[in-house]
Image (cartoon, grey):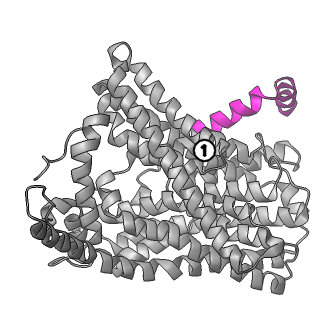
């Protein structure tokens, strides 16, 4: 039987490995469905465990040489697997909750990454040599900080219920997506730094490169989203074929991602905001049948890509080549792994709790309890402890060439990354459901979430607007009142003005229902 399998694999070098991997992927989906109601297991953990079992079998068939049937590379991840995941995240996001909490999400997803990266970089730079782990350069230490600052909130989001905890779900989801995008942008910015001349200007150069990449990538995604929405509204593809509507959305989203990568921008940010704009405008310009099909297809593509990645991580954990090449003692390897986990715990806590307090100050409102309680903060902190696909991809991009490395130090960092991803996903992921059920019992109504989700800025505040008919003194008073409200309640004020601008100018051009009639 084994000889027959070997001969078959030799005759069809590409078809057989892909067929086997797809079969394992189907098995993973079926088992994940059967274990969906399990208190301890989720889709990510199921994929990793099945990947580990499959890797063990393949390792045995290959006479303890390799557990791979496919060779993972950063190109495979960044070009084929990541775009559908991020685009679906932007397309499926609850825009009202996301933008009402936009400042908090950006605090966690942008400022938080800088804080976490600084702590992990400084901690590893100081502790690794003391543990006997030598050989990393200054650029690689900076890269390590960004690699392990990228979170994976899939485990937590599979437990949280969006209808029961809309505020918490929005923050965890938003931080996860923005965090991944920020980590990749920061990683790319680090690659451009001249580490041989690190001085006081280096940090300003890094921040400048980051702001440039972040802003231009976002602008490109917004542009593609608006162009797609306008094209669907004016040309009305559904008149002849609803398939064209879906095709133009998928292809334009993918084109935005590839163009961003071609221009050395962040494809993640571009395709994410492209998805948001398409969902906000373009989705209303297609036929009813296309709306249903579109959401299902995007969700399916994202789900398969995520499962693919975690399945491969489970297999890659048994790659004997990397383990033999590390040349580190088991004690040193475990000590460096423990150091990284400790720095991840400290790095995430260092910004979640202080920035949550700052967010509560920004979201102050009369007769409203603090939107982020201590229990919420603990859940947000816990959700950001797990590392996943982006960490794996960035590690492969930094420490391998097309998925292969012959350097012992690089091999040690790859194995460290795999161990961290496995440990955080399995151990922290197993404890996610019990922790959330303990902190946020489902039978208890989250009053702060309901208040956050049910009240819109329009209901909460009434802002005075300038009028051409009014006198100059009246307009000055109105401007002062608007400015004072902006200072007191910045989140709700900005969101209120954006809704009025969106209803009056954007939706009539690009499509979508008007949420409320404009006020004079």
Q: Nearer the viewer, residue 125 or 316?
A: 125
Direction from residue 129 to residue 519 in the image, left or right: left
Give the labeled residue for mark 1: 260
**Is 208 one of the magenta-colored residues?**
no
Residue at the top extreme? 240
Judged left or right of residue 131, residue 260 is: left
**308 over 126 or under it: above or below:** above
Along the viewing direction, whichever of 476 and 283 lies nearer the viewer? 476
- In the rendered image of this protein, does residue 82 appear above or below residue 391? above
- The secondary structure type at the circle numbered 1 is helix
Which quadrant of the structure image shows residue 487?
A: bottom left
21 sits to left or right of 415: left
**Magenta span main SS:** helix
Magenta part of the chain: 1-26
Q: Position of residue 265 (x, y in %)?
A: 62, 50
Quadrant where the N terminus sits is: top right
Q: Residue visible at 33% across and 42% down?
A: 280
Q: Indicate the position of residue 448 as horizontal and vertical percent values.
A: 23, 71
| Residue 478 location, quadrant | bottom left
Residue positioned most to the front: 472
Location of residue 141 in the rendering, given as x and y in whole percent from the top left corner: 76, 72
Residue under the image location 62 percent in, 39 percent down: 258
How many discs appear?
A: 1
Can residue 17 be found in the magenta stretch?
yes
Q: Give how far across and how far down residue 13 sits, in percent.
A: 83, 28
Residue in the image at 19% along x and 42% along y: 514
Quick check: can you spot residue 40?
A: no
């Amino acid at each position: 039987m084994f000889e027959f399998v070997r001969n078959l694999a030799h005759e069809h070098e590409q078809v057989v490995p892909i067929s086997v991997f797809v079969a394992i992927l189907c098995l993973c989906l079926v088992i994940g469905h059967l274990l969906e109601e399990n208190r301890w297991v989720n889709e990510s953990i199921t994929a990793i465990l099945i990947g580990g079992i499959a890797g063990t079998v393949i390792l045995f068939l290959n006479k303890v040489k390799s557990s791979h049937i496919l060779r993972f590379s950063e190109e495979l991840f960044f070009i084929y697997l990541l775009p559908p995941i991020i685009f679906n995240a932007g397309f499926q996001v609850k825009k009202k909750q996301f933008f009402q909490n936009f400042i908090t999400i950006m605090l966690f997803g942008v400022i938080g990454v800088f804080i976490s990266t600084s702590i992990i970089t400084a901690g590893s730079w100081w502790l690794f040599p003391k543990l006997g782990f030598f050989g990393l350069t200054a650029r690689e230490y900076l890269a390590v900080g960004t690699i392990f600052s990228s979170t994976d909130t899939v485990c937590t989001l599979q437990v949280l219920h969006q209808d029961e905890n809309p505020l918490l779900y929005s923050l965890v989801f938003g931080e996860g997506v923005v965090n991944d995008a920020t980590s990749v942008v920061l990683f790319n910015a680090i690659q451009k730094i001249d580490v041989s001349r690190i001085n006081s200007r280096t940090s300003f150069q890094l921040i400048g490169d980051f702001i440039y990449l972040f802003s231009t990538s976002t602008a490109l995604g917004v542009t593609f989203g608006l162009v797609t929405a306008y094209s669907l509204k004016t040309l009305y593809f559904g008149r002849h074929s609803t398939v064209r509507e879906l095709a133009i959305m998928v292809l334009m989203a993918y084109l935005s991602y590839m163009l961003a990568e071609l221009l050395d921008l962040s494809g993640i940010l571009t395709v994410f905001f492209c998805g948001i704009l398409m969902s906000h405008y373009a989705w209303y310009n297609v036929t009813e049948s296309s709306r249903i099909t579109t959401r299902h297809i995007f969700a399916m593509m994202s789900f398969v890509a995520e499962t693919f990645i975690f399945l491969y991580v489970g297999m890659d954990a048994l790659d004997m080549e990397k383990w033999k090449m590390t040349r580190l003692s088991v004690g040193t390897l475990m000590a460096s792994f423990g150091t990284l986990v400790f720095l991840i715990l400290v790095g995430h806590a260092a910004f979640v709790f202080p920035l949550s307090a700052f967010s509560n100050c920004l979201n102050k409102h009369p007769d409203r309890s603090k939107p982020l309680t201590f229990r919420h903060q603990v859940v947000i902190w816990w959700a950001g402890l797990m590392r996943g696909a982006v960490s794996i991809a960035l590690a492969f991009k930094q420490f391998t060439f097309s998925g292969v490395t012959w350097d012992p130090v690089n091999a040690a960092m790859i194995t460290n990354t795999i161990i961290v991803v496995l440990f955080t996903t399995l151990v922290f992921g197993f404890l996610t459901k019990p922790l959330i059920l303990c902190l946020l019992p489902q039978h208890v109504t989250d009053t702060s979430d309901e208040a956050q989700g049910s009240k819109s800025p329009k209901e909460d505040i009434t802002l005075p607007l300038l009028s051409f008919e009014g006198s100059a003194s009246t307009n000055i008073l109105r401007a002062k009142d608007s400015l004072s409200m902006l200072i007191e309640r910045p989140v709700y004020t900005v969101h209120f003005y954006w809704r009025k601008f969106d209803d009056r100018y954007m939706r009539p051009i690009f499509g979508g229902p008007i949420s409320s009639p404009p006020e004079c």
